[in-house]
Amino acid sequence: MVRSELLEQIYTIVAQIPPGRVTTYGRVAKMTEGATARMVGTAMRHLPDGHELPWHRVINASRRVTEHEGAARQRERLWAEGVIFDASGRVSPDVMWP
DNA sequence: TGCATGACTCCCC
DNA sequence: GGGGGAGCCATGC
């Protein structure tokens, strides 16, 4: 069970990622000082319908979009925000959110 | 209760 | 940069 406090922290941090920027599961986890990267991924999967979270701005440590059910949508949204993917499918280090 | 699974990361080669 | 393996921990059956 993910403690609601952590869940709230994870959501709060993700909500703070500015448009056109991305961050990693690991960084979000580190900022919560208690969650792990896997927990962040789990939290994203459990997002309720109608949420307003920019979940698509969370990618993995390799700066790629992890393959899952909504991966295609995630790439589309990032592209729409101006996030450029190189030939290898990685985003530019410049768009990384600290 | 137990075990497999996964929207992960780190370390080593 | 990339592949393989170990570690991690909540979830779900």
Image: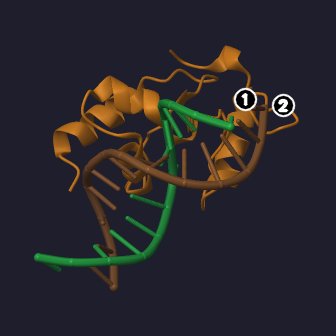
Chain colours: A orange, B green, C brown
Q: Is residue A3 above or below residue A17?
A: below
Could you say which disc has been placed on residue A60 in the image? none
Q: Is residue A1 above or below residue A51?
A: below
Residue depicted at 41% across the width and 40% down the height: A37
Task: Please give left or right for residue A22 compared with residue C12 in the image.
Answer: right
Q: Amino acid at mark 1?
A: Val
Residue A51 location, x and y as percent?
41, 47
Identify the chain of the residue marked 2, using the numbered disc in the image: A
Residue depicted at 64% across the width and 23% down the height: A20
Task: Please give left or right for residue C10 compared with residue A48 in the image.
Answer: left
Residue contact at pointers 2 and 1, CB within 8 angstroms: yes
Q: Secondary structure at mark 1?
A: loop
In-front residue for pair A82/A24: A24
CA distance for labels 2 and 1 = 6 Å
In-front residue for pair A50/A93: A93
Residue B6 location, x and y as percent?
49, 61
Residue depicted at 57% across the width and 40% down the height: A56
In-front residue for pair A26/A43: A26
Identify the chain of the residue marked 1, using the numbered disc in the image: A
Could you say which disc has been placed on residue A91 in the image? 1
- Looking at the rendering, which quadrant does residue A59 occupy? top right
Instruction: Mark 2 vs mark 1: tell me if same chain.
Output: yes
Q: Amino acid at mark 2?
A: Asp
**Residue position marked by numbered label 2 in the rendering:** A86
N-terminal label among 2 and 1: 2
Judge the density around disc 1: few (<14), some (14-19), many (≥20) Cα neighbours within 10 Å: many
